[in-house]
Image (cartoon, grey):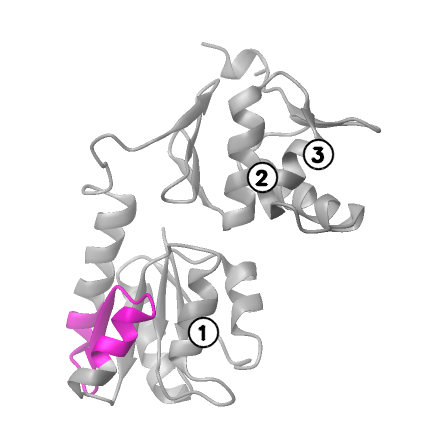
């Protein structure tokens, strides 16, 4: 089951979209807090976003750019604006598709399924796609996804870079300095900021049932060492 995030300020339309999406076996979460769309995106971690253009405070183009700074998750605009320039602007800001209102709900469902197949399903494999693998755990840096068996977890850009750095050197220790350079170049970052990102990666691993793999070596850095229990052993 996939999660679809709906960012639409018409509650009736949002409710109908949610109903149709659930009817086809996926979950749909409606976002009502239009001042904190990015925060809700990070909480929900959706597989597809349905995004209106006309929203309170900031428009859909703004939120599309914000989401794109963290994720390659498919974004489909749904808008009453049918002009060519509106659609071009959406695509230039990172959208994957654009549906004009009024629309047939089956078209929306078909567009969602198309994006799901492209990114997560039948058409997801890309020739020559770079991967980082460790003990059956596979990181797809371009997709910003982590996969274990049939489980897939979406990552932010920082989480992806951090995991790629740690997995690529596992089980060796990676110094704090190396991680900071990878994540923020030469910018000054305090210890708390790095700790927050480490905690987020631990949470992503825990979502996949991987506990205690990311170790903190006090005063030195971090290392990731995945050792499966008997039931996971090859």
Label 2, secondary structure: give it.
helix
Residue at mark 2: 182
Q: Position of residue 86 (x, y in %)?
A: 24, 83
Label number found at residue 63: 1
Residue at x 49%, y 47% (from the top left corner): 155
Name the N-terminal-most of marks 1 and 3: 1
> Up-down: is 85 above or below 183?
below
- The residue carrying pointer 1 sits among few (fewer than 14), some (14 to 19) or many (20 or more) residues within 10 Å by Cα, namely many
| SS for dot 3 | helix
**CA distance for labels 1 and 2:** 26 Å
Q: Are marks 1 and 2 in contact (CB under 8 Å)?
A: no
> Can residue 38 be found in the magenta stretch?
no
Residue stretch rendered in magenta on the structure: 87-108
Q: Earlier in the sequence, mark 3 or mark 2?
A: 3
**Magenta-colored stretch includes residue 103:** yes
Which label belongs to residue 177? 3
| Outermost residue, right side | 219
Q: Quadrant of residue 198?
A: top right
Numbered label tally: 3
Q: Residue at x 66, y 40 (%)?
A: 180
x and y percent of residue 231 in the render?
A: 53, 15
Q: Nearer the viewer, residue 168 or 147?
A: 168
């Amino acid at each position: 089951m996939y999660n679809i995030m709906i960012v639409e300020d018409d509650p009736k339309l949002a409710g109908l979209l949610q109903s149709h999406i659930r009817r086809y076996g996926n979950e749909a979460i409606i976002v009502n807090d239009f001042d904190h769309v990015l925060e809700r995106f990070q909480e929900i971690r959706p597989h597809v976003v349905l995004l209106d253009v006309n929203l309170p405070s900031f428009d859909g183009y703004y939120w599309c750019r914000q989401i794109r700074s963290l994720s390659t998750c498919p974004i489909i605009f749904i808008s009453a604006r049918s002009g060519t320039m509106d659609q071009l602007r959406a695509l230039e800001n990172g959208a994957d598709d654009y549906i004009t209102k009024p629309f047939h709900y089956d078209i929306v469902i078909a567009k969602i399924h198309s994006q799901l197949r492209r990114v997560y399903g039948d058409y997801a494999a890309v020739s020559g796609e770079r991967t980082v693998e460790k003990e059956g755990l596979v990181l797809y840096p371009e997709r910003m996804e982590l996969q274990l068996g049939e489980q897939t977890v979406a990552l932010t850009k920082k989480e992806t870079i951090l995991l790629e750095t740690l997995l690529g050197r596992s089980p060796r220790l990676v110094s704090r300095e190396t991680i900071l350079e990878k994540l923020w170049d030469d910018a000054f970052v305090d210890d708390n900021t790095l700790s927050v990102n480490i905690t987020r990666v631990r949470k992503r691993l825990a979502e996949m049932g991987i506990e205690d793999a990311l170790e903190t070596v006090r005063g030195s850095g971090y290392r990731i060492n995945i050792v499966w229990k008997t039931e996971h052993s090859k």
